[in-house]
């Protein structure tokens, strides 16, 4: 479904240039749930933004659903691939009601039947019609994230890109959103690409994962292997150990992997 | 000196029926509703979700709750001294020198227009009568104590020129230079990467045990607190619903704690729906 | 059993207040009105702001009902009663031509209101369009537009007004045009600053990811967020606009006699200010009160509309 070859993204010019993504190659199959894991500065979000079309300064090859993508996306692409952002407080326009937020993509693409679509998608994400005319500041963090997911689903995409969708949420709310994503994926046959720094979330929601560090792809593995701790690269092993809670001896052994 | 501190019998901190209330349009709203605990020379973790009142608890110990919030308690004593009755001058004395606080994001808690070295030196001079040269020497010592490899070079850096992990270590250096007895850490590692988190926690661990400090570690990360602290308090809606030793967390009794533990995804568990916490309104009562 | 049986089963109907403050609005209109009501209740709590609002409303009412409220005709001269102090017949005294100052002030309110309304309708709008375009597109669009703004900002209002009236002839309409043309740059800057703050937000990215055109994003997403700052700045600027118009009138460039424009009244009263102080002081007081009203209103609006309060 998604095919990335030798993706390279540089920011800035000349001596100050930063290579955020340095030759990443990976594939995501249709219907798969794929996790892209890394710490800050690893380039994982940059990869996602390049795939989504938000970032147009990349070199390499990106193909989605067999169609190769250029720096600018065609309007039809947005009906195929949508994104959910990390911060529920920043991804909804503070002055728009939920209704307006959901009606906008319908209007842009000229799909009719707005009322029915909005009601359906709100029910799909577990919010009832009571939420339809609220403003974002009248919603909790989990509810806002549901609206963001609803907005992504309104165009009935096949691919959903998620940039740390639960990092800003409380633990109990995170569980609800993960369950919701799991159900939606099953019901709509979605392909998910999940960017996160949290290995436990990946273990819960994904089939396969790739680990990135400093713009490079370190390792790809199945979630089954992750669960067994069967990582091959030292960076991945370090990440695994760090995710398991504080241990004085382990902390001592941590290295900076360039 | 650490041994002498260890031999002290009075608990470091006594909190009894702490309440923090804020006036709203519909009357007083209590963010903290009757929290009680004692702290010795140990690491106490306070865990809760947003709105549980955990940060407010930490801040009220230092009397840092901004007006119009009101802090009341039956007893709030530090080393036997009543903090509620203390004069503002005495509180200023205690803050920083005896009780220190490390906050979440060094981006917001370090002065952006001063070099980090100067900030640390200044923190030292505020609480002692040292001169500039002596303060600089102590600051460099502290930078080395928080495992910064090149203290001389980092001394002249500005906060925006250092990474998050280093910024947090600088914050710790600044807060621990007056050699306080109690450290309140409010989500000190939440903004950091996992590996950096471990390293910063190791520094905190070492410094606290070397100096015989008590530490209150406020966080939303239950697993982290369970592995780092000695004792844990779980807070919900302004109340402490569970208090146990960190090693016994898995045997917790309160349904909120059990629900929270169950809803955490784990690397070693197969994928599947996570049990969702259903909030019993009875938990809002004692 | 009960003797009265009026509507025993229907629930007690909720009042309009509940309808406005409900957590679950049922239509767009209800949501918008509810939000406006919340803003009004917040505004109402600030007594000074309400005072400002009352002053501005008073200005509007006085201007609207001028012919009814004024005891005398503003142009009626009575050379026997020149420069009379405030009395029962003339509450604020008379000027050098024996005209009733109170009536002239009341009719002058119309002119003041007209100036304020014209400037408020044109300058902020121009600034909004230019500022959002510059901020959103960046690059050479930003550079060109901002350099134009800088050039416009470099002209002192009064000098440009002088140039205009020299070219077009003196008169209140030309004075208003001159003020409006020199007033838009600060609004452009404010709109641009707000746009730059918001441009990288996730909700803008989300809109782009839906395929929204730049025009749709600017009109529907960015402008609504700039409006709050612009409204506040406009009300605060109104005081300055009135004073500039008064200054032009003082220089003889704005309203021409016998129009009862407040600044021109101060100018003509200047020579009598030591003996017959009321001729200049009364219009001065009127300008002061109206400027104060706009300032208080603007401050109150800022507290209510500032997005940080969300």
Image (tube, rainbow, N blue to C red):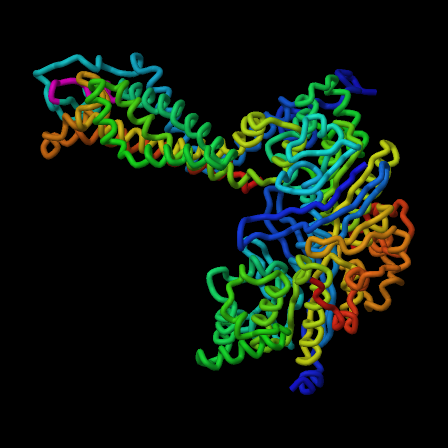
* Horizontal side, residue C106 vs residue B19: left or right: left
Residue B83 placement (x, y as % from top left): 60, 70
Task: Indicate yes or no whether the magenta region holds residue C103.
Answer: yes
Q: Locate residue C183 relative to residue B98 in the image: left or right.
A: left
- In the foreground, B257 or C195: C195
Q: Is residue A124 above or below residue B65?
A: above
Query: Quarter of the image containing the C terminus of chain B?
Result: bottom right
Instruction: Say which quadrant the N terminus of chain B sits in.
Output: bottom right
Residue C263 sits in which quadrant?
Answer: top left
- The image quadrant of residue B273 is top right
Q: Position of residue A47 (x, y in %)?
A: 70, 45
Q: Is residue C156 above or below residue B113?
A: above
Magenta span has C306?
Answer: no
Where is residue A228 shown, x and y percent of the image? Answer: 91, 58
Image location (x, y in percent) of residue C113 = 33, 22
**Residue at the extreme left of the image, as rendered:** C80
Task: Please give left or right for residue A36 compared with residue B154 in the image.
Answer: right
Q: Is residue C94 above or below residue B69?
A: above
* Total count of labels: 0
- Which residue lies at the image location 50% right of the left edge and 74% below the top edge? B121
Q: Is residue C129 above or below residue B244?
A: above
Quadrant housing residue B266: bottom right
Question: Is any atom of residue B262 visible in this view?
Answer: yes
On screen, residue B235 versus residue B254, left or right, reads left
Q: Which residues are magenta?
A: C96-105
Residue B19 at least partly seen: no
Q: Residue at x 71, y 64 (%)?
A: A257
């Amino acid at each position: 479904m998604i095919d990335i070859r030798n993706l390279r993204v540089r920011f800035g010019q000349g001596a100050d240039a930063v290579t955020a993504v340095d030759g990443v190659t990976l594939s995501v199959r249709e219907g798969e749930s794929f996790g892209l894991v890394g710490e800050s500065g690893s380039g994982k979000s940059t990869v996602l933004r390049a795939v989504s079309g938000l970032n147009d300064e990349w070199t390499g090859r990106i193909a989605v659903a067999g169609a190769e993508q250029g720096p600018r996306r065609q309007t039809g692409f947005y009906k195929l691939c949508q994104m959910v952002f990390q911060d529920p407080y920043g991804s909804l326009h503070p002055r728009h009601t939920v209704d307006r937020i959901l009606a906008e993509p319908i209007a842009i693409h000229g799909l009719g039947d707005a009322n029915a679509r909005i009601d359906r998608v709100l029910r799909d994400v577990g919010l009832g019609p009571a939420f339809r005319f609220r403003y974002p500041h009248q919603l909790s963090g989990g509810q806002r994230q549901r609206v963001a997911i609803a907005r992504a689903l309104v165009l009935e995409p096949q691919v959903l890109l998620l940039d740390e969708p639960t990092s800003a949420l409380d633990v109990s709310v995170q569980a609800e959103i993960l369950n919701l994503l799991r159900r939606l994926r099953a019901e709509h046959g979605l392909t998910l690409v999940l960017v996160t720094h949290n290995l436990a979330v990946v273990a819960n929601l994904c089939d396969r994962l790739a680990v990135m560090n400093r713009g490079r792809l370190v390792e790809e593995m199945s979630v089954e292997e992750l669960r067994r701790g069967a990582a091959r690269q030292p960076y991945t092993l370090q990440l695994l150990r760090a995710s398991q809670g504080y241990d004085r001896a382990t902390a001592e052994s941590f290295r900076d992997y360039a | 000196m650490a041994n002498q501190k260890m031999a002290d019998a009075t608990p470091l901190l006594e909190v009894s029926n702490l309440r923090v209330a804020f006036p709203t349009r519909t009357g007083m709203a209590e963010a903290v509703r009757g929290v009680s605990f004692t702290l010795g020379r140990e690491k106490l973790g306070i865990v809760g979700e947003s709105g549980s009142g955990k940060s407010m608890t930490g801040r009220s110990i230092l009397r840092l709750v901004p007006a119009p919030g009101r802090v009341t308690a039956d007893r709030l004593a530090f080393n036997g001294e009543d903090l509620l009755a203390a004069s503002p001058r005495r509180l200023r004395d205690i803050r920083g020198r005896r009780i220190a606080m490390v906050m979440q994001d060094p981006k917001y808690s370090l002065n952006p227009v001063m070099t980090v070295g100067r900030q640390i030196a200044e923190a030292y001079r505020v609480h002692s009568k040292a001169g500039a040269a002596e303060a600089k020497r102590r600051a460099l010592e502290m930078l080395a104590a928080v495992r910064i490899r090149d203290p001389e070079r980092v001394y002249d850096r500005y906060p925006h020129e250092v990474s998050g992990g280093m910024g947090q270590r600088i914050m710790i250096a600044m807060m621990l230079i007056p050699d306080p007895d109690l450290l309140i850490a409010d989500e000190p590692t939440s903004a950091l990467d996992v590996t950096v988190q471990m390293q910063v926690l190791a520094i905190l661990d070492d410094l606290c045990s070397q100096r015989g400090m008590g530490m209150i570690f406020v966080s939303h990360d239950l697993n982290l607190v369970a592995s780092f602290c000695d004792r844990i308090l779980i807070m919900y809606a302004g109340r402490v619903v569970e208090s146990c030793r960190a090693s016994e967390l898995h045997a917790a009794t309160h349904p909120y704690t059990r629900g929270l533990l169950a809803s955490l995804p784990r690397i070693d568990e197969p994928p599947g729906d996570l049990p969702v916490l259903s909030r019993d309104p009875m938990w809002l009562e004692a | 059993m009960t003797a009265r049986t009026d509507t025993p089963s229907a629930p007690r109907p909720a009042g309009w207040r509940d309808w406005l403050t409900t957590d679950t609005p049922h239509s767009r209109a209800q949501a918008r009105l509810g939000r406006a009501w919340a803003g009004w209740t917040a505004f109402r709590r600030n007594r000074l702001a309400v005072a400002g609002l009352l002053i501005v409303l008073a200005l509007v009412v006085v201007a609207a009902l001028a012919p009814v409220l004024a005891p005398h005709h503003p142009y009626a001269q009575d050379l026997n009663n020149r420069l009379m102090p405030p009395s029962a017949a003339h509450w604020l005294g008379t000027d050098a031509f024996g005209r009733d100052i109170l009536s002239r002030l009341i009719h002058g309110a119309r002119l003041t209101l007209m100036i304020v309304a014209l400037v408020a309708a044109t300058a902020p709008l121009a600034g909004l369009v230019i500022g959002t375009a510059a901020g959103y597109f960046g690059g050479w669009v930003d550079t060109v537009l901002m350099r134009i703004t800088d050039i416009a900002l470099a002209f002192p209002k009064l000098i440009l007004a002088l140039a205009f009236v020299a070219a077009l002839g003196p008169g209140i309409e030309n004075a208003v045009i001159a003020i409006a043309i020199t007033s838009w740059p600060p609004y452009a800057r404010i709109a641009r600053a707000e746009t730059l703050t918001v441009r990288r937000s996730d909700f803008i990215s989300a809109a782009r990811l839906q395929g929204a055109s730049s025009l749709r994003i600017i009109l529907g997403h960015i402008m609504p967020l700039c409006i709050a700052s612009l409204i506040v700045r406009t009300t605060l600027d109104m005081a300055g606009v009135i004073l500039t118009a008064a200054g032009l009138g003082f220089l003889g460039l704005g309203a021409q006699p016998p129009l009862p424009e407040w600044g021109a009244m101060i100018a003509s009263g200047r020579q009598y200010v030591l003996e017959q102080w009321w001729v200049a002081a009364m219009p001065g007081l009127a300008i002061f009160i109206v400027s104060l009203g706009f300032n208080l209103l603007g401050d109150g609006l800022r507290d209510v509309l500032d997005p940080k309060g969300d």
